[in-house]
Amino acid sequence: MTKRILLAAAAVLALPLPAFAQTHDVAALRDAALKDDLAWEITEGLTTEVGQRLAATEAEARARNWAMKKLTALGFRNVRSEPFKMPVWVRGEETAEVVGPMAQKLTLAALGNSGSTGAAGLEAEVAYFASFADLQAAPAGSLKGKIAFIDHRMAPTQDGSSYGVFGVARRAGPSVAASKGAVATLIRSIGTDYHRNPHTGGTNWTVGVKPIPAAALALPDAEQLQRLLKRGPVRLKLVVTPQFKGEGESGNVIAEVPGSDPAAGIVLIACHLDSWDLATGAIDDASGCGIVTAAAKRIMDAGQPRRTIRVLWAGAEEPGVFGGRAYFEAHKGDRHVLASESDFGADRVWKFDATLPEGAKPVADRLAAALAPLGVGRGGDPANGGADVGAVIQSGVAAIDLAQSGLRYFDYHHTPDDTLDKVDPAQLRQNVAAWTTMLAVTANAPEDIGPTAPVAR
Amino acid sequence: MTKRILLAAAAVLALPLPAFAQTHDVAALRDAALKDDLAWEITEGLTTEVGQRLAATEAEARARNWAMKKLTALGFRNVRSEPFKMPVWVRGEETAEVVGPMAQKLTLAALGNSGSTGAAGLEAEVAYFASFADLQAAPAGSLKGKIAFIDHRMAPTQDGSSYGVFGVARRAGPSVAASKGAVATLIRSIGTDYHRNPHTGGTNWTVGVKPIPAAALALPDAEQLQRLLKRGPVRLKLVVTPQFKGEGESGNVIAEVPGSDPAAGIVLIACHLDSWDLATGAIDDASGCGIVTAAAKRIMDAGQPRRTIRVLWAGAEEPGVFGGRAYFEAHKGDRHVLASESDFGADRVWKFDATLPEGAKPVADRLAAALAPLGVGRGGDPANGGADVGAVIQSGVAAIDLAQSGLRYFDYHHTPDDTLDKVDPAQLRQNVAAWTTMLAVTANAPEDIGPTAPVAR
C-alpha cells in the first residue's frame, strides 16, 4: 500500500483519510532515517555529559534529568519520571595477587551483588573448573576454603545466543560455588575480547546462600591464571569490597507521541537509561535510547500516527530489570498492543522476528517488505522484546525484535571499553531506519493487534 | 654458496673446512626455524612465571634469575648477570575526576618519571593543546595553575615512524608545560587503539625543571575530555602519587655462542628483559628475547659459527636505556663487528636495513637473497639497531635491522594489554627464521666486517 494510491482513492471518495495514510510514506521515512543525526546526538550527549550511570546512584538521577530535558525539548508529550525503590549495590576496591614465587597482579572486576572480602582481603588456593557444568559436578563441601575459578571458551555469535550458554557461569556460578563451601568465586569474563578490561554483570544468590566475593577476570588474566595452574597450585590474595547500601531510588522516564485512535492501543518501545559503572554505557544502552527515540521523533514529525507510541527509558535494568518490572506494575492496565526494545548495541539490524496474533500477520508481511531494502531479513524465531518489556510481553502482548549483529557486542559488553568510539554512526543510522520503518508500519496498521497467548517461561 | 658445492670441494682438496661451511646451510636453517617452538616457550615462560618486571624492582631481579637459568639450560656459554645501579621510580595511585555537573572518572596512567600530586591530589582547570607544537607556542607563564592537556592524532605506520613524530608529546610535553607554569600534564596516550588502557612510557625533565604530575589518558578518555572541553571549561581532580625511590640495582644478562675465530669479532644481538609495570611485556620485549635467543640456539646447535654470537638481555631499557649504556661502558673494549636488536613486538619482519662498511657489502647481498623467501625485502634506510645496542653502534659498529610490522604495535605498547595473547605464534616463527638467517650469514661471513664511521646523532 503506497501513499500515492491512497491519495488517489481519497480524491475520488472525498472522505477523510486516517491520519497515518495522509502523512506516512514508509519507504520515504525509512530512507530519510538513513541520514539521522538524532540517535548519535543522544548517544553522544548522554555518555559525555553524564558518563556512567549506575542504577540508583546520583549519576543515574542526573541521567533521568538529562533524559526528561532532552525528550521535552524534542517535542514529546507526557514526559515524566516514574520513581521506584530498589536495593543499591556499589563497587569498592578490587585487587587480586598471585602469592609466592610467581607473584603478580591479575585484573578483575566485582560482579554486581558480589559479597565483600572485607578491607583485609582473603588468601586461599584456587580450585579450577573448566566449565559451569564441572562446577556443578563438584561434590558438596569440596570447595571448603577454596576460591573457585570457572573457566569457559565463549565464542561470539551473530545472534548473541552464546551469552545465554556461557553467561550462566556468571549468573549462577558464584552461588553454586558458595553452596559447596567456596570462600570466593572468579570467573573468566563473559566476553570475547582480549583486553585487560573485565566484564562485570549481575550474579544471583539462591535463597539461603550467603553472598561471597565474586569477580570476573579479564580474558588475558584468566588465561594467565590457567597457565599458572598448569605449573602447580596457585594461591591468591583477593581484596574485593563492594557494599550493599540498602534501599535507594531509581526511576523510569517515559515520553509519548499520542495517537489519533486511543482505542487502537499503545506501541511500547524501550531502552534502558542506566549503565554499569565501569564505562559510559554507549552501546549498553545509550545507543538504544538514541535509536528508539530518533525513530519515534521521525514518526511524530511526519504527522500523528494512529496508535500512541510510548518511549520508555527504563531505569535500573542492569542490576535486575527493576525498571521494567516497576513499569509493568504501574501500567498493566494500559492497552499495550506491541512492545519492543533496543538493547543489544548499535551494530546493524540483520533480521527481525515477530510474535503477533493471527489477525495481525499481514503487518509482519508489510514489515518484511519494507525492511528488506535495509538488508534486514525475516526470521522465524519468537520475539522476546528485551528485558524491560519482558513482563509486558509475557502478559500477552505482541512483540517485534529488530535483531542487531552480536559479533562485536561481547567484546565490550559490561567492560570499561563500552564508550562512544565503539558506536559506528553508519550502523547506528541503519538501526534508526529499521525502527522508523517498524513504527511507521505498526503504529499505523489498520488491523487490530490483539493479545497473544501469555508466554510460559 | 651452498653446502653441497663446498663439501664436494673439500672432498677433492682433503683440507679442513672452516667450521661454518661444514655445518651451516643457510636455507635449511631458515626453513627449519619456521617450525621453531623455543621463542614461544621463552615468551610464554617469562611472561607467565615472572609477569611484569619493572626495572630495578624485585620482579626484574626474578626475571634475571629466570633468564640465567633458562640460558644455561639451553646450553649457552658464559652466561652471567652484570649488575648496575640506576634511579628507581615506582607507580602509586592514579585517579582523575571531572568536577562539577558532569562529574565522572577518567582512566589514566602516570608516565615514568612523573612527579606526584601528593595523596591529597590537586584540582585545577584544563588548558587544551591540539598538539605539542601548540603547547610550545604558548606564552611563558600562561599555564600557571593549569593542567595542560596535550592532544594529537597518532596514526599507525608500518615502520613505526609515527612514534617518533607523536611521542614527543610524552617525552618532552610535561617538561615544556611545567616550564610554562602548569601544575600537571595530561597527554592523549601515544597509541592507536580505542581501549580503556592508557599507554605509559618515560618522560624527561629538562635540567632545572621540577617534575610535575604527568599522566596519559586512554584514548576513549582523551576524546571524552575533548568533548567535555567543547561544552565549556573543565576542572579536574587529580591524584597521581608515584615515587622516586633513590638508587637501586638492575642488571644485564649475557650469554654466548663462542666462535671458532676470536679475531673475527663478536655479533651482538639484543632484546630487553625489563618491561613496564602495567602488563607482562609480551611484545615489549619478552618476544624479542625469545626471537634472538631461539635464533642463536639454532646456530649453536648447527655447529660452531666463525664469530662469537653474544646474546644480551638488557635490563632497564624502558626507564632510559640504563642497561644498554651500562653494557657499552663495560664492553667498549670488546671487538663488536655487528649489532642488532629485536624490540618492536612479534609481528612479521617485512624488510631489512643494513649499515655495513664498504668491504662487507656482499654480506648484505647474500642476506637479501636468503631473506627473500620469508617475504623480507631490502630497505635502503640506515640501520639503527635498537636502543640497547645504540651506544655500541654509534661508536662505529655495523648494524642490521630486521624491521617488524608496526601496524598493531602501538595498539598495545606500554599498556596493560601487552600480554601473551597479542603474540601470533606464526609471525613469531617468521621472526626466528629471519634472525636465524641473519646470524647464519653474518656470523659465518668470510669477509672482514670492520668499523663503520661513528654516527653523529
Image (cartoon, coloured by chain):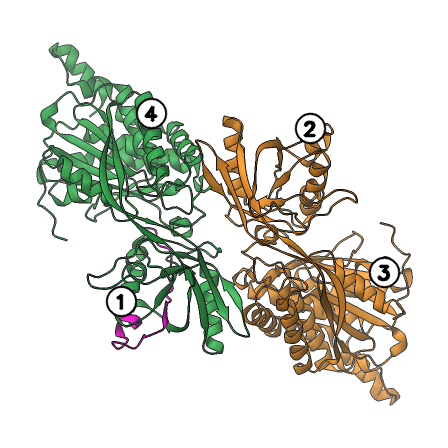
Chain colours: A green, B orange
**Left or right position of B382 against A261:** right
Q: Residues within 10 Å of mark 1 (few under 14, many from 20)?
A: many
Which label was assigned to residue A63?
none
Q: Looking at the rendering, which quadrant does residue A28 occupy?
A: top left
Q: Between residue A69 and residue A342, name the one nearer to us.
A: A69
Q: Look at the numbered discs 2 and 1 and tell me whether their residues touch, using CB distance below 8 Å.
A: no
Task: Name the chain letter of the residue that bears numbered label 2.
Answer: B
Do callouts 4 and 2 point to residues on the same chain? no
Q: Residues within 10 Å of mark 4 (few under 14, many from 20)?
A: few
Q: Where residue A298 sits: x, y (%)?
A: 30, 24
User: Which residue is at 19% across, 48% downward?
Assistant: A382
Q: What residue would you read off at disc 4? A: A69
Q: Nearer the viewer, mark 4 or mark 2?
A: 2
Q: What residue would you read off at disc 2? A: B142
Identify which amino acid the numbered label 4 is placed on: Lys
Q: Looking at the rendering, which quadrant does residue A422 occupy?
A: top left
Task: Name the chain letter of the residue that bears numbered label 1.
Answer: A
Q: Between residue A395 and residue B351, name the one nearer to us.
A: A395
User: Which residue is at 39% across, 46% downward?
Assistant: A277
Which label was assigned to residue A176?
1
What range is drawn magenta here?
A133-158
Secondary structure that dominates the magenta span: loop
Identify which amino acid the numbered label 1 is placed on: Val
Q: Nearer the viewer, mark 4 or mark 3?
A: 4
Alpha carbon distance from label 2 to label 3: 49 Å
Q: What residue would you read off at disc 3? A: B356
Query: Residue B157: within the magenta?
Result: no
Alpha carbon distance from label 4 to label 2: 38 Å
Q: How many numbered discs sit on the rendered protein?
A: 4
Do callouts 4 and 3 point to residues on the same chain? no
